[in-house]
Amino acid sequence: GVRDRFVGRALALLHEAPEEAWTVDELSQRVGLSRSALHERFADMIGQGPMQYLANWRMQVGAGLLRDTSFPVAAVAQQVGYESEAAFSRAFKRLVGMPPAQWRRRAKG
């Protein structure tokens, strides 16, 4: 994806600021490509759409913060773009398979 200038720029933006309230509209405007073209190119190169990628990236960043810091789950949620601890916890459990606090205990155990 980094070889394609549009997808590469989109990836860079998502990685630089996962906490932003990204939409496909905003991302496509920032990279200079239509929404549909960006989504298609992104999905072809990355294997998923930009918003799904962002959700997974946020969980990776969140997991790292849970493992490497003692930040409360609510603080981790905010740092990765969730407005509430509950929303982050639901998303984390859906993608990782367990709640963040439980994952943290296992990761640090």
Image: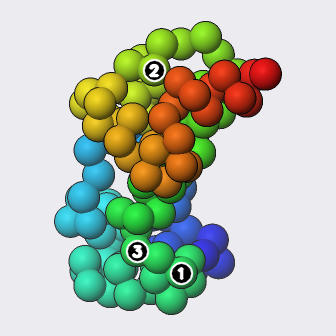
- Helix, strand or loop at label 2? It is helix
Residue 44 in the image: state x and y as whole percent. 50, 88
Of the numbered discs 1 and 2, the one sitting upstream in the chain is 1
Label 1 and label 2: CA atoms lie apart by 29 Å
**Observer-nearest of 30 and 64:** 64
Query: In the drawing, what numbered circle is on residue 49?
Result: 3
- Vertical placement of residue 14 versus 5, above or below: above
3 and 1 marks in contact (CB < 8 Å): no
Q: Badge 2, how many Cα within 10 Å: few under 14, some, many 20+?
A: many
Is 75 on the left or on the right of 56, as rendered?
left
Amino acid type at mark 3 = Gly
Amino acid type at mark 1 = Gly
At horizontal 61% and vertical 11% (from top left) the residue drawn is 70
- How many marks on residues? 3
Residue 40 in the image: state x and y as whole percent. 38, 87
Query: In the drawing, what numbered circle is on residue 47?
Result: 1
Amino acid type at mark 2 = Val
